[in-house]
Image: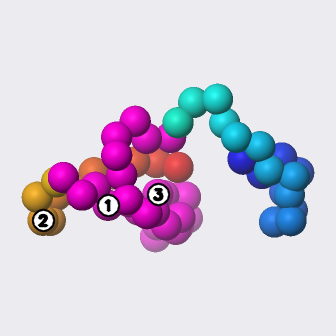
Amino acid sequence: MLTDGRIEGPWTHAKQLLMDRNAGHSSLLRDLEGKLRICKHYRDTPHRSKKRIPA
C-alpha cells in the first residue's frame, strides 16, 4: 500500500489480501463513472466469465 501518495513510496504490505484465490496479473482502471476498479483474470474460470470487484 502506498502510504504517502508518492509513487516512490514508502510502500507497505496490507495485513489482508485483496483476493483470496490464485489469480493472475491485474490492472487498475476507472470506469465510466470514475470509480476505481480492479481488472483481474483467474486461470481456472471459463472464458467470458466476469466478476466485478470494486477497488
Q: What span is in magenta?
A: 18-44
Q: CA distance from mark 3 to mark 2?
A: 18 Å
Foreground: 41 or 33? 41
Q: What crowding class fits label 2: few (fewer than 14 Cα within 10 Å), some (14-19), or many (20 or more)? A: few
The residue indicated by pointer 2 is 47
Which of the marked residues, 3 or 2, is nearer the chain's N terminus?
3
Considering every residue shown, the one lying at the far left of the view is: 46
Foreground: 33 or 17? 17
Is the C-beta separation of discs 3 and 2 under 8 Å? no
Is the C-beta separation of discs 3 and 1 under 8 Å? no
Amino acid, disc 3: Ile
> Image check: 42 left or right of 34?
left
Q: Position of residue 49 (x, y in %)?
A: 16, 58
Q: What crowding class fits label 1: few (fewer than 14 Cα within 10 Å), some (14-19), or many (20 or more)? A: some
Which of the labelled discs sits on residue 31, or is there none?
none
The residue indicated by pointer 3 is 38
The residue indicated by pointer 1 is 41
Q: Residue at x 40, y 48 (%)?
A: 53
Amino acid, disc 2: His
Nearer mark to the viewer, of 3 and 1: 1
Q: Position of residue 11 (x, y in %)?
A: 80, 50
Q: Residue at x 46, y 48 (%)?
A: 54
Under tag 2, what secondary structure? loop
Under tag 1, what secondary structure? strand
> Image check: 27 left or right of 20?
right
Q: Residue at x 11, y 58 (%)?
A: 46
Residue 36 sits inside the magenta stretch: yes
Q: Residue at x 34, y 40 (%)?
A: 21
